[in-house]
Image (cartoon, rainbow, N blue to C red):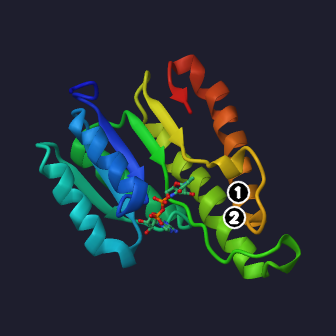
Amino acid sequence: MNRMQHTVALVTGAAGGMGRAHCRRLAEEGADIIALDIEAAAPELAETAREVEATGRQCVTGVADVRDQAALDVAVADGVAALGRLDVIVANAGIYTDLGLSWELSDQAWQRTIDINLTGMWHTVRAAVPALSDGGSVVIVSSTNGIVGAAAAAHYSASKHAVVGLARTLANELGPRGIRVN
Ligand SMILES: NC(=O)c1ccc[n+]([C@@H]2O[C@H](COP(=O)([O-])OP(=O)(O)OC[C@H]3O[C@@H](n4cnc5c(N)ncnc54)[C@H](O)[C@@H]3O)[C@@H](O)[C@H]2O)c1
C-alpha cells in the first residue's frame, strides 16, 4: 500500500479519534504527516506520532488551537519546513459539545462551536493552502449534520453545513491547479 508515497499530509485534531486514524492510514499509504492539536492533547498527540512512526513514516507534531491563526501559521510553516512539501490538508479538528435545543443554547456554546468548527477550518485553509502542491487535495470534515438537521445541535449543524459551503467554494478556487476539495 503506497498510494501516498512521496507526499506530506497535514491533519488538525490529530491527537485522537478520527484525526489519529487519518494520520495512521495516510502513513500506511506512504505519506509523512504534520499532526496538529491543542496543548492539552500533547500526550495523545505524541502517541499519534509514535503510531505514524511505527509505519516507517515521519511525523512532525505541532501545537495549535485552530481558533488561533498566528499559532496555526507557525505550526504549518514549521511542519512544511521540516518535511519539505505539503500535498494534503485534512481539516478535521471539531467539537460536538454543549448540546441543547436551538433557542436554549448559550452564547458561549454557540460561539465556541462556530469558532472551532467553522472559523477553525477556514484558519486551517488560510494557513496551509498557500503551501499546497498543485495536484494536491483538501479534505474538510463535515458530518451528516452538515447535510441534514438533527435536534439539539443547531450550533454544530450550522457549522457543519457552513463548511460544506467552504469546501464547495475552495473546489472552484483550487480546481484550476488540479487540487481536489472534498
Ligand atoms: N465521531 C463522529 O461520529 C463524527 C461524525 C461526523 C463528523 N465528525 C467530525 O469529525 C471530526 C473529528 O471528530 P472525532 O469524533 O474524531 O472527535 P474527537 O473529539 O475524538 O477528536 C477531535 C480532536 O480535535 C481536537 N481539537 C478540539 N478542539 C480543538 C481546537 N480548538 N484546535 C485544535 N484541535 C482541537 C481535540 O483535541 C481532538 O484531538 C470533527 O470535525 C467532527 O465534527 C465526527
Given contact means CB atoms under 8 Å apart, are the residues at marks 2 and 1 in contact?
Answer: yes
Q: Is residue 26 left or right of residue 37?
A: left
Front in this rendered view, residue 77 or 40: 40
Q: Which amino acid does label 1 sit on?
A: Ser
The residue sitting at the front extreme is: 151
Q: Which amino acid does label 2 sit on?
A: Ile
Q: Where is residue 74 in the image (x, y as percent from the top left)?
A: 39, 59
- Crowding at dot 2, Cα within 10 Å, few <14 / some 14-19 / many 20+, comes out as many
Q: How far apart are marks 2 and 1 (CA)?
A: 6 Å
Q: Where is residue 134 in the image (x, y as percent from the top left)?
A: 44, 23
Q: In this view, does 179 lie to the left or right of 31?
A: right
Q: Where is residue 100 in the image (x, y as percent from the top left)?
A: 76, 76
Image quarter hosting the C terminus: top right
Mark 1 lies on residue: 159
Quarter of the figure with residue 7: top left
Mark 2 lies on residue: 114
Q: Is mark 1 on a helix, strand or loop?
A: helix
Q: Is residue 160 left or right of residue 135?
A: right
Q: In this view, does 82 lie above or below 168?
A: below
Quarter of the figure with residue 80: top left
Q: What element carries label 2?
A: helix
Q: Where is residue 20 in the image (x, y as percent from the top left)?
A: 34, 55
Front in this rendered view, residue 82 or 119: 119
Residue at 27% across, 47% down: 24
Q: Is residue 13 left or right of residue 80?
A: right
Residue at 45% across, 65% down: 71
The tag earlier along the polypeptide, 2 or 1, is 2
Residue at 72% across, 81% down: 108
Residue at 35% across, 37% down: 86
Image quarter hosting the N terminus: top left
- Crowding at dot 1, Cα within 10 Å, few <14 / some 14-19 / many 20+, comes out as many
Task: Tell me the number on the disc at residue 110.
Answer: none
